[in-house]
Image (cartoon, coloured by chain):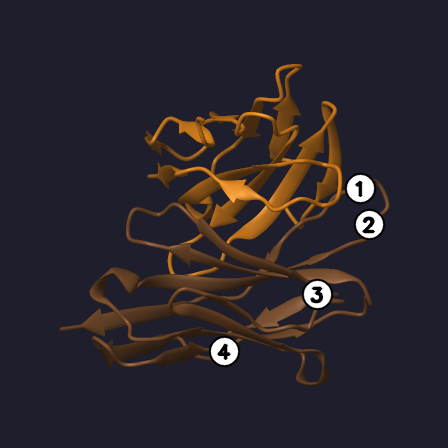
Amino acid sequence: DAGVTQSPTHLIKTRGQQVTLRCSPKSGHDTVSWYQQALGQGPQFIFQYYEEEERQRGNFPDRFSGHQFPNYSSELNVNALLLGDSALYLCASSLFEGRDTQYFGPGTRLTVL
Amino acid sequence: AQKVTQAQTEISVVEKEDVTLDCVYETRDTTYYLFWYKQPPSGELVFLIRRNSFDEQNEISGRYSWNFQKSTSSFNFTITASQVVDSAVYFCALSEALITGGGNKLTFGTGTQLKVEL
């Protein structure tokens, strides 16, 4: 049973560029959440998708956008990258029903130069 | 607003010692969930436990145990007879149960770095 997968593992971009990160949920899960974890900090909630709609959003600017596909996989897009966007981006999947436990993927390490 | 506080930034112990990681939370909701996750150096967050606000029974799983006390808004985690493989960052997290639109975001503490030495 495959767990949550994310791609790519690592990414290096320069300021002003755009980036797309991808996530495939654990088998049987229908909800995907994205978190940003800066070095030495706890993960911060970006947004959550269910039924291809954004269901909840954290305090992140509009530069951060997402999408969920019919197969439940998801993308996180960040435009106009800033140095401060350098972080580990974590994807978590869960079942929407019953506010199920979120299971995390290995993350994508984004470095903005 | 939800808040989770992990006051211990770093703890160092010698193998076989017991260690307790503290977690204090704030929420206005009467129904909520509490979690502990482990983050080894590889970076992936590993789920350890979930408790709902109506279940204050303490739980034990092998060398791990959790003490949930609503009266003090605390959800502490104890590792008995610690091992080097327990070295990791441990995060406590909180989610509300009832959100318009259905989202259940996790609010994390800043984590406690546990170092277990031989």
> In terms of sequence position, does the residue under pointer 2 or pointer 3 come before the other?
3
Q: In this view, does B102 lie to the left or right of B82?
A: right
In the image, B10 versus B69, the foreground residue is: B69
**Disc 1: host chain:** B
Measure the alpha-carbon separation of dots 4 and 2.
Answer: 27 Å
Q: Residue at x 67, y 38 (%)?
A: A48
> In terms of sequence position, does the residue under pointer 4 or pointer 1 come before the other?
4
Q: Do residues under tags 2 and 1 come within 8 Å of each other at their CB atoms?
A: yes
**Residue A53: where, in percent of width, then height?**
75, 27
Q: Do labels 2 and 3 share a chain?
A: yes
> In terms of sequence position, does the residue under pointer 4 or pointer 2 come before the other?
4
Above or below B107: residue A60: above
Secondary structure found at label 1: loop
Chain A image colour: orange
Q: Which amino acid does label 2 sit on?
A: Ile
**Residue A59: where, in percent of width, then height?**
67, 50
Secondary structure found at label 4: loop
**Disc 3: host chain:** B
- As drawn, which residue projects farthest toward the left? B118
Q: Are marks 1 and 3 on the same chain?
A: yes
Quarter of the image where one finds residue B116: bottom left
> In terms of sequence position, does the residue under pointer 1 or pointer 3 come before the other?
3
Which residue corresponds to mark 1?
Answer: B102
CA neighbours of label 1 inside 10 A, class few (<14), some (14 to 19), many (20+): some
Q: Are marks 3 and 4 on the same chain?
A: yes
Chain B image colour: brown
**Disc 4: host chain:** B
Which residue corresponds to mark 2?
Answer: B99
